[in-house]
Image (cartoon, helix red, strand yellow):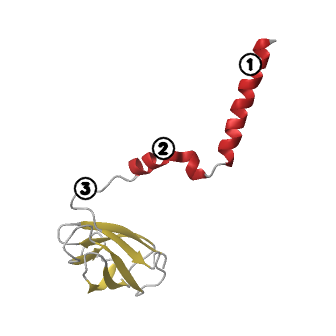
């Protein structure tokens, strides 16, 4: 009879612990394991590739549509150039204009190439020592 009581108490303790954990917020459940996983999932980029870039709107929906390129230089000197596409013969963006070259927050404007079709194309930024890339999705 003693083994049954100990087994029952252990089972109740385990159940209570699991129920208590289920009522805890997700952040409390994850604890430091969640922080470690996030750090491993997103390692710091190497020197030379720390600029951050976004394109808006993304995805684009009309040929000739104006887009805005924003981001920061991640330690670079300031926005020097924006390139879009894999080669100069088939650019994704045209009429690229740097509006603000501030390394802590740059802005550029461009228009979607009139020959572009549905797909995905890279948008690169050169920040004088740091570079960044994002993908522009086109649904035209």
Between marks 3 and 1 in the image, the one whose residue lies nearer the viewer = 1
Image position of 78 with respect to 3: above or below: below
Q: Are marks 2 and 3 in contact (CB under 8 Å)?
A: no
Q: Nearer the viewer, residue 104 or 79?
A: 104
Between circles 2 and 1, the one closer to the viewer is 1
Specify few, some or many for label 2: CA neighbours under 10 Å numbering under 14, 14-19, or 20 or more: few
Q: In the rendered structure, which disc, 3 or 1, sits on the residue that comes first in sequence?
A: 1
Q: Can you give x and y, in whole percent of width and height, for residue 108 in the image?
A: 31, 83
Q: Is residue 69 left or right of residue 21?
A: left
Is residue 57 toward the left or the right of residue 132 in the image? right
Residue at point 77% right, 23% down? 8
Q: Measure the C-alpha gap from mark 2 to mark 3.
A: 24 Å
Image point (43%, 85%), residue name: 63
Q: Is residue 36 visible?
A: yes
Q: Secondary structure at mark 1?
A: helix
Q: Which mark is residue 33?
A: 2
Label 1: which residue? Answer: 6
Tag on residue 46? 3
Q: What x and y, as percent, mark residue 69? A: 35, 79
């Amino acid at each position: 009879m003693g083994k049954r009581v100990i087994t029952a108490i252990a089972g109740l303790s385990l159940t209570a612990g699991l129920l208590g954990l289920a009522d805890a917020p997700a952040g409390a459940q994850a604890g430091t394991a969640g922080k470690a996983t996030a750090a491993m999932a997103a390692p710091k980029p190497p020197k030379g590739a720390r600029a951050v870039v976004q394109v808006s709107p993304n995805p684009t929906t009309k040929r000739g549509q104006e887009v805005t390129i924003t981001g920061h230089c991640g330690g670079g000197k300031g926005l020097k150039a924006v390139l879009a596409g894999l080669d100069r013969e088939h650019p994704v963006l045209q009429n690229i204009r740097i509006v603000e070259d501030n390394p802590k927050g740059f802005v550029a404007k461009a228009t979607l190439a009139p020959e572009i079709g549905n797909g995905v194309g890279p948008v690169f930024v050169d920040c004088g020592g740091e570079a960044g890339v994002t993908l522009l999705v086109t649904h035209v």
